[in-house]
Amino acid sequence: MRNQVRRSASGRLRLSVFRSNKHISAQVIDDISGKTVAAASSAEKKLRGQLKNGGNVVAATVVGKTLGERCVQRGITNVVFDRGQYKYHGRVAALADGAREAGLEF
């Protein structure tokens, strides 16, 4: 699945999502250089203070918005969404919607 995303990316950065029962995190990765350009997680100290629970849809939306804002500050607007093994539903969809609200396009 990840190889399909990389082949279809055509040089764009990849927004990768990881979710656990307690937290959700996402990072924007440059596959060519193999480096993470921006990241956000519900386990971050800054976001933990705002969130009651790190593993729900509200937390996923906040993480998506935070990541989107960090990317826009760095001049990144186009990414490819890599949901990994997770269905595009619930927290994963909420994270994507939050990132779109902040200005990312995918």
Image (cartoon, helix red, strand yellow):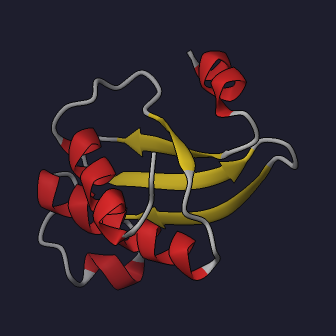
**Does residue 25 show up?**
yes
Please name whichever residue, 33 or 25, is drawn nearer the observer in this view of the structure. 33
Identify whether 28 is placed above or below 84.
Answer: below
| Side of 93 where 29 appears, left or right | right
Give me the residue at 55% from left, 54% from top.
27
Give me the residue at 61% from left, 66% from top.
76
**Does residue 42 show up?**
no
Question: Where residue 86 sits in the image (x, y, percent)?
Answer: 34, 26
Furthest toward the right, the residue is: 33
| Side of 46 where 22 appears, left or right | left
Identify whether 6 is placed above or below 3.
Answer: below
Question: Where residue 87 sits in the image (x, y, percent)?
Answer: 28, 23
**Quadrant including the C terminus:** top left
Please name whichever residue, 85 or 5, is drawn nearer the observer in this view of the structure. 5
In which image quadrant can residue 73 be found? Answer: bottom right
Question: Where residue 78 sits in the image (x, y, percent)?
Answer: 56, 54
